Image (spheres, rainbow, N blue to C red):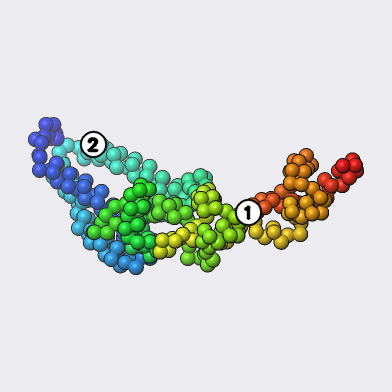
């Protein structure tokens, strides 16, 4: 016997199929909450709602199985033809995605990306952002809208893209491990850097920041590492003021000598440090020429 070639269209099965498709999408949307990597104060509530929604949506796959059975059974014709026609439809996608899944760590390694990049897709809850960065709910919501930070609302709570939030606050590191913080006023006093210049410098060099009660703090360790404050006490360098006093030169003379004699220099804050051996070499060459 042959399979029916012109089966009658069954509308209610299309409706069941639509419900099953929608349930599959919703079911996968609950996974980030069931396997949430963070530890916000309401982690128990997050996982509870994830489990409830996931349980309610689990019939999605059995619905597809039942639809397939309703349309195929009873099987008519050769059983070998039946399986030969349908097995490749399942086998090849299964093999392809299995290979991709198992090669994912290798691919990220070749691209120089950490496998943890997948965690970028996990969200922060609004309460977690407020707890970590010490910001108000209204400020967070307004800033997320203004800066187009992806967000969604689930069970009456707002959730924000973890990657975008970390980028917005200028950090992708564990700020709890940073012990020393400075304000913009401290930085301005120590490095003669204006607040606008500090904001640009922080963004360009990805200096970790945190915001507490309307005030922004910057990682002291990261700023000092970039500004090389340790060189100020290094005997291997002269400041331009020292060179002026030792050799009776003006700032214009020093700039010319540095350029002509290729003297190594390092900028620390607003000060230029000149390598002492290069300065002494340049001055000896000038003295030999009678300059």
Q: Name the residue under label 1.
A: 269
User: Can you say which quadrant of the picture contains the C terminus?
Assistant: top right
Pick whichever of labels 1 and 2 is earlier in the sequence. 2
At 69% from the left and 59% from the top, the residue drawn is 232
Q: Which residue is drawn at 10% across and 40% down?
A: 11
Along the viewing direction, whichever of 17 and 7 lies nearer the viewer:
17
* Residue furthest top as drawn: 6
Q: Classify mark 2: helix, strand or loop.
A: helix
> Eyeballing the image, is 179 above or below 169?
below
Query: Would residue 35 be seen by someone viewing this image from the given angle?
Result: no
Could you say which disc has been placed on residue 81 in the image?
2
Decide: marks 1, 2 in contact (CB < 8 A)? no
Q: Is mark 1 on a helix, strand or loop?
A: loop
**Residue 212 visible in the shown view:** yes
Characterize the local packing of mark 1: few (<14), some (14-19) or many (20 or more) Cα atoms within 10 angstroms: some
Mark 1 vs mark 2, CA separation in Å: 78 Å
In this view, the residue in front, 221 or 41, is: 221
The structure residue drawn at horizontal position 33% and vertical position 41%, both measured from the top left corner, is 93
| Residue 183 place in picture, x, y as percent | 51, 61
């Amino acid at each position: 016997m042959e399979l029916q070639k012109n089966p009658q269209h069954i509308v209610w099965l299309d409706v069941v199929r639509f419900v099953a498709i929608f349930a599959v999408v919703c079911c996968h949307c609950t996974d980030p909450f069931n396997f949430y990597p963070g530890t916000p104060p309401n982690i128990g509530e997050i996982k509870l709602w994830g489990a409830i929604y996931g349980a309610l949506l689990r019939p999605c796959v059995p619905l597809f199985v039942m639809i397939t059975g309703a349309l195929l059974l009873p099987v008519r014709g050769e059983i070998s033809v039946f399986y030969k026609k349908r097995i490749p439809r399942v086998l090849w996608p299964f093999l392809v995605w299995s290979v991709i899944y198992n090669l994912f760590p290798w691919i990220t390694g070749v691209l120089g990306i950490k496998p943890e990049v997948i965690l970028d897709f996990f969200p922060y809850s609004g309460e977690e952002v407020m707890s970590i960065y010490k910001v108000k709910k209204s400020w967070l919501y307004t800033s997320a809208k203004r800066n187009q930070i992806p967000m969604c609302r689930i069970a009456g709570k707002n959730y924000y893209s973890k990657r975008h939030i970390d980028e917005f606050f200028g950090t992708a590191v564990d700020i709890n491990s940073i012990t020393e913080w400075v304000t913009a006023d401290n930085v301005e006093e120590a490095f003669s850097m204006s607040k606008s210049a500090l904001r640009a410098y922080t963004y360009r060099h990805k200096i970790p920041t945190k915001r507490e009660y309307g005030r922004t703090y910057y990682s002291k360790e990261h700023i000092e590492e970039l500004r090389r404050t340790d060189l100020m006490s290094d005997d291997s360098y002269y400041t331009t003021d020292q060179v002026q006093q030792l050799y009776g030169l003006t700032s214009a003379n020093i700039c010319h000598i540095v350029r002509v004699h290729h003297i190594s220099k390092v900028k620390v804050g607003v000060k230029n440090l000149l390598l002492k051996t290069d300065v002494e070499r340049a001055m000896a060459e000038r003295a030999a020429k009678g300059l």
